[in-house]
């Protein structure tokens, strides 16, 4: 089977951390990327879930901007974040 080159751009810090991870598990980045490619081909899907964070939906962002305007104009009340134990 012939080989081909695949070039990708990655943030330099991410590249460094990824290379360190690959080294720790006994492989190089080429092997890791090839494993990813083979998994995508075999499964016909990405090997992880991709989904949007509903916090950043258009409706929620509009509501947040409205609330910020209200607070900035002296209306409304600012609350502290309360963390609950599970």
Image (cartoon, rainbow, N blue to C red):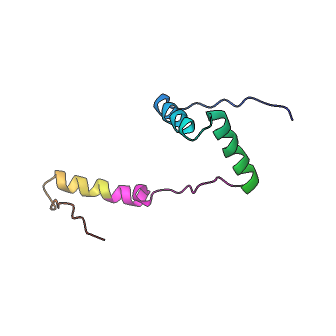
* Left or right: 77, with 55 as reference point: left
The image quadrant where one finds the N terminus is: top right
5 or 76: nearer the viewer: 5
Give x and y (percent) for residue 4: 78, 30
The quadrant holding residue 43 is bottom right
The quadrant holding residue 10 is top right
Residue 54: in magenta span: yes
Q: Which residues are magenta?
A: 45-63
Residue 30: in magenta span: no
Q: How many marks?
A: 0
The quadrant holding residue 32 is top right
* Left or right: 34, with 16 as reference point: right
User: Among all residues in the image, which is located at the extreme left?
Assistant: 74
User: Among all residues in the image, which is located at the extreme right?
Assistant: 1
Q: Is residue 82 above or below residue 72?
A: below
Q: Residue at x 62, y 34 (%)?
A: 29
Q: Residue at x 52, y 32 (%)?
A: 15
User: Among all residues in the image, which is located at the extreme bottom?
Assistant: 86
Q: Is residue 60 above or below residue 29?
A: below
Give x and y (percent) for residue 69: 23, 53
The image quadrant where one finds the C terminus is: bottom left
* Left or right: 31, with 85 as reference point: right
* Left or right: 16, with 68 as reference point: right
Give x and y (percent) for residue 36: 66, 45
80 or 43: nearer the viewer: 43
Give x and y (percent) for residue 80: 17, 60
């Amino acid at each position: 089977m012939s080989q081909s080159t695949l070039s990708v751009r990655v943030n330099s810090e991410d590249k460094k951390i990824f290379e360190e991870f690959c080294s720790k598990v006994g492989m190089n980045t080429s092997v890791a990327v090839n494993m990813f490619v083979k998994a995508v081909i075999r499964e016909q899907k990405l090997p992880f879930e991709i989904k949007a964070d509903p916090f950043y939906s258009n409706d929620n962002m509009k509501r947040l901007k409205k609330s910020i305007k209200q607070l900035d104009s002296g209306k409304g009340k600012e609350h502290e974040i309360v963390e609950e134990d599970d």
